[in-house]
Each structure stands twice: as C-alpha cells, then as structure tokens.
Image (tube, rainbow, N blue to C red):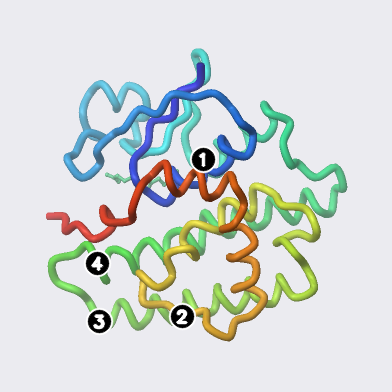
Amino acid sequence: MMQLFGYDTINTLKVLMLLMETDAEFEFVPINIRAGEQHKREFLDINPAGKVPVLRDGSQHQTESNAILMSLAHKMNWGLPEDPKEYGCMISWLFYQASTQGPHFGQIEYWNKLAKQPNTRALTHLRTIANRTIQHLDDQLKGRQFICGKNYSIADISLFPWLHIHDHLGLTIKGVNNLELWLERIGRRPASMKALAFLGSNSMFDKKIE
Ligand SMILES: N[C@@H](CCC(=O)N[C@@H](CS)C(=O)NCC(=O)O)C(=O)O
C-alpha cells in the first residue's frame, strides 16, 4: 500500500486531495515538522531534503508535491488532459504554483504568523505580489470553470490550498468573482472536503516556531 509521509501542511493537503479524488488506498505517516522530525535520520533516509510530503510507492520515494501529483495522476489514470494545449496549460500552472504562488504565500505565512517578530515591510511586499497572483488567476478563470478549461486537474488541486486559507494570510478575494467561485467549486467537492477533514482544523497554522 502507498504511504504518505506528511503533516498538517499545504503541500500535504494537495496530495491528500488527489488521493481522495482517486479513492486510492494509502497509509498516512505523520511527520511532526514542528517537533523537527523531518531532520531525523530515519526521515532523511526517505527524503534527504528534510521536507514533507513524500509518497512511498513500493521502493520509490516520490518527493515534491507537484511531482507527486503528476506521478499519482499517471498511476491512477486521473485527470491528465489528452489535448496537448490543455496538458501544456496544466504543466505551466504547476510550475507557476511551485515557483511563484507557493514561495510567496509561504513567506506571508512565515512573517505573518510563524515568526516571533512579524516583518511588516516584507509582508507589504509579499502581499503585493500575492495580490498580483490572485488577479492573474482571476483573469485566467474568466470564462473557465477550472484553471485550464472545463476539466478539473492537478493544476487546480495544486493552486487551491494556499488560496483556501487566504483569510488566515490577511489576503482578500472579496469581489474577485471568478476566483471566489472557483474556490467554492473546488471546496465543495466531496474529495476536497474529505481531505480537509482528514487534516482536521487549521489550528496548527497558528503555532509559533523558534
Ligand atoms: N517544494 C516542496 C516544498 C515542501 C515543503 O516546504 N514542505 C514543508 C511543509 S509544507 C516542510 O516540510 N518544511 C519543513 C522544513 O523545511 O524543515 C513541495 O512542494 O513538496
């Protein structure tokens, strides 16, 4: 059976959303990143980068959440567009998520909630960039149900979790209609609800770290 090493984190949520969409059987192995378990030898043997999530499938340890989404979608034959343009669109947004949305939203989380000393200058800068991302996504969603058209894909799954907690990050999407509707559309999917319930409340996001 596949094993998902993860915690109550955005990148773990992405993988859970796809596991739930595909009804895949898996065992969840919690790695408490707030207690430093990701730096222990046993876990570094699984992922030398010391990060979750990791999906173990047989002898393979797949790392990087968006790469996990790709591998799992192939394995489960789920949601990979046949149309080359749509496939290209999906890949672009997966890279955009990993290189732009993830790092900037993650830094907002750090300076807003996790750091002992909030950094308001960094926050202002990062929120400006995040608001551009929000606008960019809203423009892309104009006339589309999902990010690359009418089909839900792993690009949507990948982009959803940070936007789901926009309030918590001090970002607003009120009046950003296409994005609001997209968030609702994804949030009410049974698989998304199951994945969110699996991780429980968002209370862990409020913990301080050293
Ligand atoms: N690019 C990686 C990022 C993974 C990542 O940053 N994971 C965080 C939790 S969401 C983590 O394990 N942090 C622990 C640490 O860096 O010590 C992915 O998409 O999987």
Q: Which mark is residue 120?
A: 3
What residue do we see at 29% from left, 34% from top? 31
Tell me which corner region of the image, top left, top right, bottom left or bottom right, holds residue 25.
Answer: top right
Q: Which mark is residue 172?
A: 2
Please state if 52 lies on the left or on the right of 138 as rendered: left
Residue on which the image places disc 1? 15
**Viewer-side label of 1, 3:** 1
**Viewer-side label of 3, 4:** 4
Q: Are marks 3 and 2 in contact (CB under 8 Å)?
A: no
Label 4: few (<14), some or many (≥20) within 10 Å? some
Q: Nearer the viewer, residue 52 or 189?
A: 189
Q: Is residue 110 above or below residue 71?
A: below
SS for callout 4: helix
Tell me the distance, in whole angstroms, between the alpha carbons under discs 2 and 1. Answer: 25 Å
Q: Is residue 178 above or below residue 69?
A: below
Q: Which mark is residue 113?
A: 4
Q: Nearer the viewer, residue 134 or 13?
A: 13
Q: Are marks 2 and 1 in contact (CB under 8 Å)?
A: no
Label 1: few (<14), some or many (≥20) within 10 Å? many
